[in-house]
Image (cartoon, helix red, strand yellow):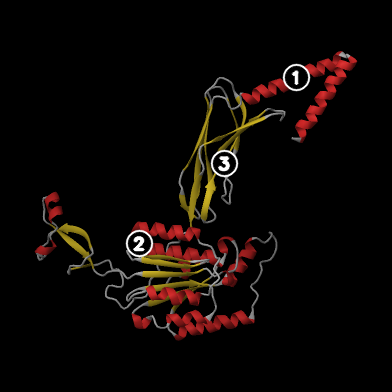
Amino acid sequence: MVRRIEFLVLAIVLVVAAFSTGLPFLFYLLYLAILVVGGSYVLTRLGLADLEAGYAVGQLQGHVGEQLRVTYTLRNAGRVPKPWLEVHNPTSLPVAIPGRAISLGPRGERSWIAKVPLTRRGHFRIEPLQVRTGDPFGFFEASATVGQAVTLIVYPRVDPLPLWRLPAANLEGSHAAPERTLQTSPLATTVRPYAPGDSMNRIHWKSTARHNEIQVKEFDLEQTADVWIFLDLDRRVQAGSGEDASAEIAIRAAASIADRSLTENRAVGLTAFGHRMSVLPADRGGRQHLKIMQLLAAVDADGSAPLMEGLVTGLARLRRGMTAVIITSSLDRGWVRPLAGLRSRGVASVILSVDARSAAAVSANRYRAPGHDELEVEVDPDLEAQTRALRHALAEHDLRTYRIAAGIPLSEQLAG
């Protein structure tokens, strides 16, 4: 705007000077200015004429660590070249989608793919495509908006847990086994050709008619036990920032355990203690997996109630044969007491204690300038005493506990 005012003042001075003095040189400058300005205006007006543009987002859901692929296509349907076009998508993603400045000849077309790493979970918005053009002197500018805005959901990272095992609950069929059983059960999983000794009530008649050969049903040896995950998001016990924050580690652990349990055909429930208590009843299958990931993508470490209050309410939902998985950074011993009575009810417990101090140290070192020594974790006597007291309380009730530290793969810490 300031540049246009300066140009207007200069044009007025040139016109007044040319007509007041009558010098040919000033008239030459005046005609040249009219030619340049007029040509720039026409070039800008034609810059977006006969232009076709579009973009396509490769996916509307993804996990942290994956890449988002956006495909762009611009085509000049006219005979006038487009010497300068600026293309970009405004977005709320932590890493901006890179734009481009291109030129198109007559009947020309350009396509390319922009790749953006997904570095943070959450719900993000990708705005419509912005196409801008102008003249070489910057006198005029034209822009257009193409397409509609889309919402992108980034789920937390899911780490494979090949060695993760839940403790057996007091329920027959509390774990999955690869063997098949000779007894019938509600879990018929596959069919196979008939073998001598198979019972007649195991024949699957539809498959027999389809294969023109007697087929019998096979059953799972044991039914898997249900899992209920309790995720503590009390902001007072969190530390660190970014992907190394204790809250992000806890959310990633919850997502990984839920994914592993659903793969084992377990029914998984989830309770997240954030600003408000979010509860997903236990269920199996891909639909439950999607519900859990959507919830974990949206939660924040903004809770204000201690974990003990949430457990007193949430543990009442557990029934015999379930396994409770508590993920927390709290060093308060009060929340151990509600877990003490679960064993008598036939409910097993697993505690994932996230080390908030290691999360703070790893976060500080990640953003430390190159060439500086790494920061060491300062030993706080009070925190050390609380940590020892919590470990003693957990050991006293014989509760299986995993200590989760920042900077170490989750699969290594949950092995065994």
Q: Are marks 1 and 2 in contact (CB under 8 Å)?
A: no
Query: Marks 3 and 1: which is nearer the front?
Result: 1
Comparing marks 1 and 2, which lies closer to the viewer? 1
**Residue depicted at x 32% and y 71%:** 225
Q: Earlier in the sequence, mark 3 or mark 1?
A: 1
Q: Disc 1 to disc 2, how far (Cα)?
A: 72 Å
| Residue at image location 65% in from the left, 75% down from the top | 378
How many marks are shown on the rendered structure?
A: 3
Task: Tell me which numbered mark, 2 or 3, is placed earlier along the sequence.
Answer: 3
For mark 3, does the 10 Å Cα neighbourhood hold few (<14), some (14 to 19), or many (20 or more) residues? many
Amino acid found under the numbered disc labelled 3:
Asn
Q: Is residue 334 left or right of residue 384?
A: left
Label 2: element kind: helix
Q: Earlier in the sequence, mark 1 or mark 2?
A: 1
Q: Which mark is residue 263?
A: 2
Q: Residue 412: image x %, image y %?
A: 47, 68
Residue 69, placed above or below residue 160 = above
Q: According to the image, label 3 marks what residue? A: 89
Q: Which mark is residue 34?
A: 1
Please state if 233 lies on the left or on the right of 179 as rendered: right
The residue positioned 31% from the left and 71% from the top of the image is 175
10 Å neighbourhood of mark 1: few (<14), some, or many (≥20)?
few
User: 280 left or right of 211?
Assistant: right
Amino acid found under the numbered disc labelled 2: Thr
Viewer-proximal residue, 359 or 368? 359
Give whichever of 11, 212 is nearer the camera: 11
Q: Nearer the viewer, residue 302 or 121?
A: 302
